[in-house]
Each structure stands twice: as structure tokens, then as C-alpha cells.
Amino acid sequence: MRARKITEGKAVLFALGLAVVIVPRLADAAVVVADPTGDADPAFLAELKASLETVAAEAPPDVNGELRSSAELTVAGVELVVELAPNDGKSPIRMTRVASKASALSQARAMARAVLKTFMSLSSSATEPTAQAPVMAANVPQPAEVIPLPEPPKPPPAPPLAEKYDRRIAIWLSLFPTVVMTVGGGGLSYLSVVAGRAMGIPGMAIATIGLSLGPSLGYFWIGRTQHALVMAGVRLAALGVGITFMALYVKTFQWGDGDIEQKSHPGFLITSIIGFNATLAAAFVDAGLVGRAADRANVQWRESQKVKVQVAPVAWSNGNGDGTFGLAVSGAF
């Protein structure tokens, strides 16, 4: 008997030790139901706790927390509050609902199951990797690719306008003889004075032809005959004034015994200088403007080459005296 009692005592001690080890672990892994609070009847609060313990027994073992509740009496019924406070310190999950006293217990159980379900869904979503992240990242709108538009083709260059007169040839025809004959004739006249040779008259003749007719050669070539003759006459007249008054000025000298005495006639010299300068200015300005005259002549020539058609109403009669009307067409090609 004594041995049996010792054996039974050892078994009891073993069971108590196992309970000490296992019970805290079960408590850590279970949902504990706290005593409900509120101003409801104590009997109702006891029934409320029993109802919540039924739901807590259904919870999975990995749900760790405390199920709290309260019941307040209001005019509309019983205001129920059910929340689950996780043991890991996270925010409680709470639900509030107003129910009648007859359906309050069933509503409390439904609320407890709802907060447990919410806790499990939040726990699973926190532990599982999000497979939608790459898809969402792939759905982020990307900036539109900028494709440069091809440059429009450049239009072909316009064909050159038809020309009958080359402005460079017209300028050359006017400037070249003017410069060469004026410089050459002036050089011969200077040699006649310095070297004492009889070249004064040929030199003056060559210079006169160059200044008067030289600029007009380009105008003759482009068909501006009237302009060429008028300007040649103007330059010849200005040159004649300069030569004439220079001769009058020279005649005012008195030649004595190796000395020259001059009378006071400065007007002759001034008029002569004005005549020579006017001739030079008119010659070179007219020769420089022959290019513009050639351009205008080309414009007039292109206009004359266009086809022109004119239509006009006319009236005529046949041999029997009958009159009729019609249109007369004339064209220039």
C-alpha cells in the first residue's frame, strides 16, 4: 500500500509539473476572454462572457490576444463593443454595434468572429510577400517616347531668272574705257608739259572722249540710247566749260621779260575747276549706275516675253446688211 501511495504521489507531481510547463504555453497561444464591462445586468454580462469564450475556443492556436467586451444599456437597445487586443502590442481591432437585448448575445458572437477574422487576414497579409508589387510597378505609366519628326524636304531652289543683259558686262563696258582713256589722256597731257613734246592736244582729245562717251558705252549696249546720248552731251558741255574758262584764265597772264604777271580774274579759275569736277563726277556716277539700268532692262524684256491675250467685243455686218456681235481675240507671243 505504501509503495502504491508513493507511486500515485509521483504521478501527481509529474502531472503538476507538466501542467506548469504546458499551461503557460497554451495560455500564450490562446485567446483569453476578459470580464465584460458596462452597466448591463451582471447575469447578462456573465452570459456575454460565456458566449465570447465559445468563439475564443474556435480561434486558431496562432492567434494570441485578449478578447474584451462591454455592454451599455441605451434607449435603442444594448450598445455592444467587442475588441481583440493582440499580445504583440499592435493596435486593437474593435467593433461597435447596437442590438436588441434578445439578439445581443448572437450579435456579440458575430462581432467576435469578425474581429478574429480581421486579425488573421491582417497577419497573413503582413507575412506573405506581395506578388502584386511587380504588376503594379509594371502598370505605372511610363513617359511617352519622343520620336522626332522628319524634317520636311526643302523646296528646290528657284530657277534663275532669264536675263538678256549681264550687269557685269554693262559695268565693264562703261568703267573700263572711262578709266583707261581719262588716265591715258591726262598722262599724255602731263608729258607734253614736262617733256616739252607736242602731246597736249592728243592727250586732251583722248581724255575728252573717255569722260564724255566712255560711260555711255554700257547704256548703248543695253538699248538705253537716249540716256547715253543725253548724258554724253551733259558731260561734254561741263568739260567744255572747264576747258574754256581755263583758257580764259590763262589769257589773263601777261608775259614780260621772263616774268609772268597775273591780273585779278579768280572767277575764271573757279568756274573751270567746277566744270572739270562736274565732268568727273557725272562720268563715274553714270558708269557705276549702269548695272541698275541693266537690271531694269532685263525686267522689261521678261515682261515683253510673256504671252498677252486681249478679248474685246466687236460688231460687224454681212453683205445682206444683217448685223451681229462677237468677240475679237488678239495676242502677243
Image (cartoon, helix red, strand yellow):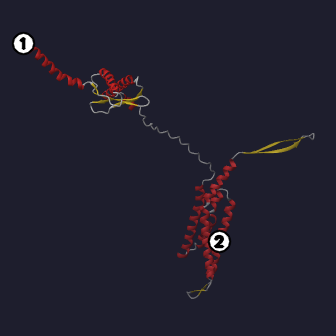
Marks 1/2: CA–CA distance:
168 Å
Image location of residue 240, percent across then percent down: 65, 72
Residue 238 disc label: 2
| Disc 2 residue type (three-letter) | Ala
In the rendered image of this protein, does residue 205 appear above or below residue 87?
below
Q: Quadrant of residue 110?
A: top left
Q: Is residue 201 visible?
A: no
Image location of residue 286, percent across then percent down: 62, 63
Residue appearing at x 57%, y 65% in the figure? 179
In the rendered image of this protein, does residue 15 appear above or below residue 209?
above
Query: Between disc 1 and disc 2, whose residue precedes?
Result: 1
Q: Quick one: which residue is furthest to the right in this view?
A: 320
Labelled pair 1, 2 in contact (Cβ < 8 Å): no
Q: Quick one: which residue is furthest to the left in this view?
A: 2
Residue 3 disc label: 1
Tell me: 109 left or right of 185: left
Q: Is residue 19 visible?
A: yes
The quarter of the rendered structure image containing the N terminus is top left
